[in-house]
Amino acid sequence: GDNRCPRDLDGLLLWFGILGLATLAVDCADGLPPGVSWVRIALKGTLLILSWVGAFWTFTLQGSAHELCGVYLTTVSAFLWTALVTLQLLSACFMFWEMSVIVEHEHSLHHMLGGDDDLDP
């Protein structure tokens, strides 16, 4: 780019892609047992944060900045960062829903096996 854009949207897209590829490489290199590596956690955390930064940067651009950044870059950024943030929120909802189902199954097993009633909420 020519660096006229007030937010470095193209640089953010580039770094997101580079870190995404690095995350894939680390995931493949860690082997079959799902060990927890600090590099894996750091890369995935950085990708999580970058998607929110990208969404914030894209949607806080003023009218004249859209022209400076270019229609293509702002449109692609808007769709990409919105999709990533939406997928993150849906994943979090799904995770919490699954946790509630597990707790419900645990309670039903507890009642079926005749355990103490002290654990009931």
Image: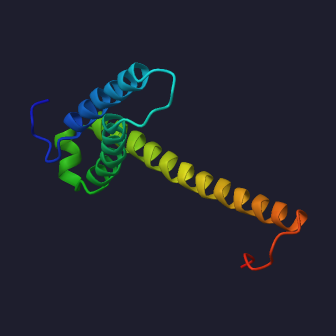
- Quadrant of the rendered image containing residue 43: top left
Residue nearest the viewer, comparing 84 with 76? 84
Decide if residue 2 is on the left or right side of residue 12.
Answer: left
Residue nearest the viewer, comparing 56 with 26? 26
Residue nearest the viewer, comparing 39 with 23? 39
Residue 61 image point, x, y percent:
24, 53
Identity of the residue drawn at 56% across and 51% down = 90
Quadrant into which the N terminus falls: top left
Identity of the residue drawn at 83% across and 69% down = 115
Decide if residue 7 is on the left or right side of residue 56.
Answer: left
Residue 9 image point, x, y percent:
23, 40
Identity of the residue drawn at 42% across and 37% down = 36
Residue nearest the viewer, comparing 63 with 99? 99
Q: How many marks?
A: 0
Residue 105 image point, x, y percent:
78, 58
Can you say whether 113 is above or below 15 in the image?
Answer: below
- For the rendered model, the colour scheme is rainbow
Can you say whether 2 is above or below 54 in the image?
Answer: above
Quadrant into which the C terminus falls: bottom right
Decide if residue 50 is on the left or right side of residue 79.
Answer: left
Decide if residue 53 is on the left or right side of residue 120.
Answer: left
- Quadrant of the rendered image containing residue 51: top left
Can you say whether 38 is above or below 98 in the image?
Answer: above
Q: Check the image and name the residue furthest to the left.
A: 3
Can you say whether 111 is above or below 1 in the image?
Answer: below
Residue 76 image point, x, y percent:
36, 36
